[in-house]
Amino acid sequence: MDSFKDIFESVKELCSTAPDVSSIGFNRWIKVLEGDRLENGTAYIIAPNEFTQKTVTDVYGDVIKKCFFDILGFDVNIVITAKNEEAEKQELETKQKQIDRIIDSGKYEYTFDTFIKGKSNELAYAFSTAVAGLNDTNDMNTKDVFNPLFIYGDSGLGKTHLVKSIEHEVKRRDPDMKVIYTTGESFLNELIKQIGLKNMVAFHEKYRNADFLIVDDIQFIAGKDSAQEEFFHTFNEIYNAGKQIVLTSDIPPSKMSTLDDRIKGRFVLGVQVDIQPPDFETRMAIVKRKAELLNLNLTDATARIISEKIKTNIRQLEGAVKKIKALTVYTSEPATISMAQRVIKEILIENRPTEITVDNILNEVANSFGVTPQDIRSANRNASISMARKIAIYVLREVKGMTYKEIGDELKRNHSTVNISYQDATEMIKNNSDLKASVTELIKNLREI
């Protein structure tokens, strides 16, 4: 061979027959490489852009190195550099625009027609369609039975889809009906804004005159006195006028420890229904529906892998399909089981709860009680520090499940002293509603870190 470029052409030809290199992968990633030089035992190769350079290095570097050995008879180091960063930037932008178009084409309206029913959500679906007027019966007044309709369940299970479907159907059936959809957070933010503008009349006009009020994530107002007070009166006005109310939450009213009892009493006037994580058949239907919307060819085996591994969150299921579609665009390779497995692993790692550490807990307790973590660890018996220390011991037990001895070792205290402090804290929380609310909120914040 006369030159390194000739050598590299032979290496590429050998790579094309390697068992780990598909024809699509070869054409997309290896064929486009150019040989530069062989210098001091290092083969320098040029990729058309940084994206290709990184992909080839990560995915095909070992294959290219082996093919060099087979051609030359000795090992060489491989260095792949990008030819033109501007070209790479333009290619990435083009690809991203293409993916954005694909993702947009895969979006769907929140309607009952696009909702995937299964055993985990069939009751919530039935109640929602009843409220929307789709399955009226002569012997049942839905406003008497389903007002309010309260749907609860973990995030990502379809609560928003259902209530937006109700909104869509009610507006379709009666365009003149005043339907308001909002979230607990938006309700609070709008209230704060109107208080600042001294324009509560407009706020009352908007919400209290609604024919149909839907509030998503109502748990957001729990513990917020002004929002709870305003919503209590809004609820009464609408309910007493015989108008419909639909609410969603991640937990049932009975578990909202910082929600006013009088509001809890209103929430249970109608029907509460939960949504559970989807079963396997429902997950398969969701994956296939999303793939179809994205024009993504998924084999049954690949769809099955996704459905088996991602079990508790519909958004994660749809996110996995979107990510696989993006990869097929970037790599020009078909969706395979191995590609799906990589995407699933990334999604599960991204959504894995962050471990709550002892330092996290001490910092959160210290901030809540106006002391420092060092105060909690100290021997200082100041009343406020002693209180914070007892609460920290309580939270360490409740959140991390630490033994009295483990907590004692961490705080440099005898385990029997820790036991007494835990019992004291338990009793204080039981008998002091404000303290209970503070500790509940503290624990909630820790679990959302």
Image: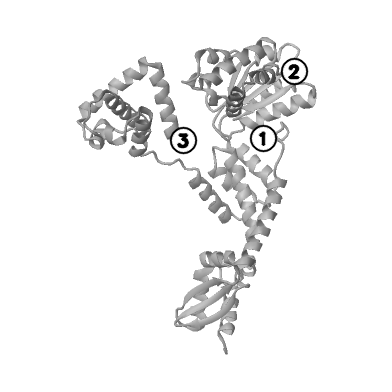
Point out the tag, 2 or 3, that comes first from the N-terminus. Answer: 2
Q: Is residue 307 left or right of residue 238?
A: left
Q: Secondary structure at mark 2?
A: loop
Marks 1 and 2, the one that precedes in the sequence: 1
Give residue 358's position: percent from left, percent from top.
33, 37
Residue 209 position by quadrant: top right
Location of mark 3 (residue): 448
Q: Which mark is residue 136?
A: 2
- Residue occupied by mark 1: 116
Label 1: few (<14), some (14–19) or many (≥20) C-alpha neighbours in 10 Å: some
Near-viewer residue (300 or 176)? 176
Instruction: Give the quarter of the image for residue 336.
Output: bottom right
Name the one closer to the observer, 82 or 59: 82
**Numbered badge on residue 301:** none
Q: Can residue 367 be seen in this snapshot?
A: yes
Disc 2/disc 3 C-alpha distance (Å): 41 Å
Q: Residue at x 59, y 84 (%)?
A: 6
* SS of the residue under disc 1: loop
Residue at image point 67% right, 11% down: 144
In the displayed structure, 106 sits above or below 381; it is: below
Count up the numbered dots.
3
Hey, what amino acid is under mark 1?
Ile
Amino acid on which disc 2 is placed: Asp
Which image quarter: residue 118? Answer: top right
User: What x and y, as percent, mark residue 391?
Assistant: 32, 26
Q: Position of residue 242 (x, y in %)?
A: 70, 11
Disc 1 vs disc 3: which is toward the camera?
Answer: 3
- Identify the colour scheme used: one colour
